[in-house]
Image: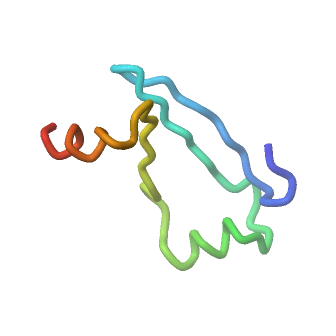
Amino acid sequence: MDDALDARWTWIRASWGLMLEVVSPRSAADTSLNRFLERTGGGLHHVSFDAADLGVFPSRLRSS
């Protein structure tokens, strides 16, 4: 839990080693998370990748 954002976080392990981070507000309090959701709606916010070598990552991403 994050008291400043009044939010809950959890991680869900999916296939292929994929980890999903799920964040949800605990209440309707006036927090930056709730203001963001009011402006943009719910759903996918961003995607992050972990890479040991950032130099080769762009070409590997394009080839997949």
In-image side of 45 versus 1 (left or right): left
Residue extending farthest to the top is 16
Going 17% across and 46% down the picture, which residue do you hit?
62
On the image, the x and y values in percent for residue 44 come to 42, 55
Number of marks in the image? Answer: 0
21 vs 30, nearest the viewer:
21
Q: Compared with residue 56, is residue 32 higher up or lower down, i.e. above or below?
A: below
Going 67% across and 65% down the picture, which residue do you hit?
33
Q: Compared with residue 18, is residue 41 higher up or lower down, i.e. above or below?
A: below
In-image side of 38 versus 50 (left or right): right
Q: Compared with residue 38, is residue 15 higher up or lower down, i.e. above or below?
A: above
On the image, the x and y values in percent for residue 9 come to 68, 42
Quadrant the C terminus occupies: top left
**Residue 4: which quarter of the image?**
bottom right
Picture colour scheme: rainbow
In-image side of 63 versus 57 (left or right): left
On the image, the x and y values in percent for residue 31 come to 76, 70
23 vs 63, nearest the viewer:
63
Going 57% across and 69% down the picture, which residue do you hit?
37
On the image, the x and y values in percent for residue 26 come to 75, 53
3 vs 18, nearest the viewer:
18
Residue extending farthest to the right is 3
Going 20% across and 43% down the picture, which residue do you hit?
59
Quadrant the N terminus occupies: top right
Residue extending farthest to the bottom is 39
Residue extending farthest to the front is 55
